[in-house]
Image: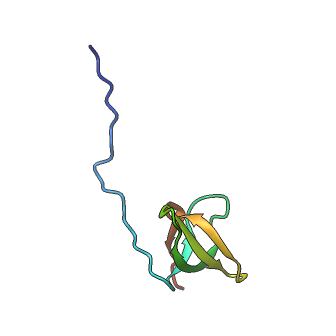
Amino acid sequence: MLRYHTESSSEPAPITTFHKGDDVELAEGTYQGTTGVFLSLRADPKWADIREADSQVRAHPVEWLQLAHRA
C-alpha cells in the first residue's frame, strides 16, 4: 500500500504576539499595506480588530498582520 507524504518546511513559522497599541500593517490580503493600531483579538482568536488610519475599526485575519516597520 502506498502512503502519501507531504513535505513540510523545516523552518518553524514565525509567531508574532501583538499587544494593544502595537503599530501593525497588513502583510497579505486584498488590503495589503494598510496600517493601523492593534486593539484586540476577537472571540475567534484567528481574527483581530485594528484601528486603521482613517479611525475606523475593522477586523482582519491575524495571520495577515505584521508589526509595522517604523521609518
From the top left corner, tell me how far across and down residue 14 is, in percent: 36, 63
Check the picture and name the quadrant holding the C terminus.
bottom right
Residue 55, relative to residue 28: is it above or below? below
In-image side of 56 versus 63 (left or right): right
Whether residue 40 is visible, yes or no, is: yes
From the top left corner, tell me how far across and down residue 66 is, in percent: 49, 70
Whether residue 33 is visible, yes or no, is: no
From the top left corner, tell me how far across and down residue 3 is, in percent: 29, 22
In-image side of 55 versus 62 (left or right): right
Give the colour scheme shown. Answer: rainbow
* Total residue callouts: 0
Picture residue at 28% right of the left edge, 49% below the top: 10
Which image quarter: residue 15? Answer: bottom left
From the top left corner, tell me how far across and down residue 31 is, in percent: 67, 64
Which image quarter: residue 61? Answer: bottom right
Residue furthest to the front: 43
Picture residue at 26% right of the left edge, 13% below the top: 1
Picture residue at 55% right of the left edge, 65% below the top: 27
Residue 3, relative to residue 51: is it above or below? above
Picture residue at 47% right of the left edge, 64% below the top: 45
Residue 53, relative to residue 13: is it above or below? below
Residue furthest to the top: 1
In-image side of 31 versus 13 (left or right): right
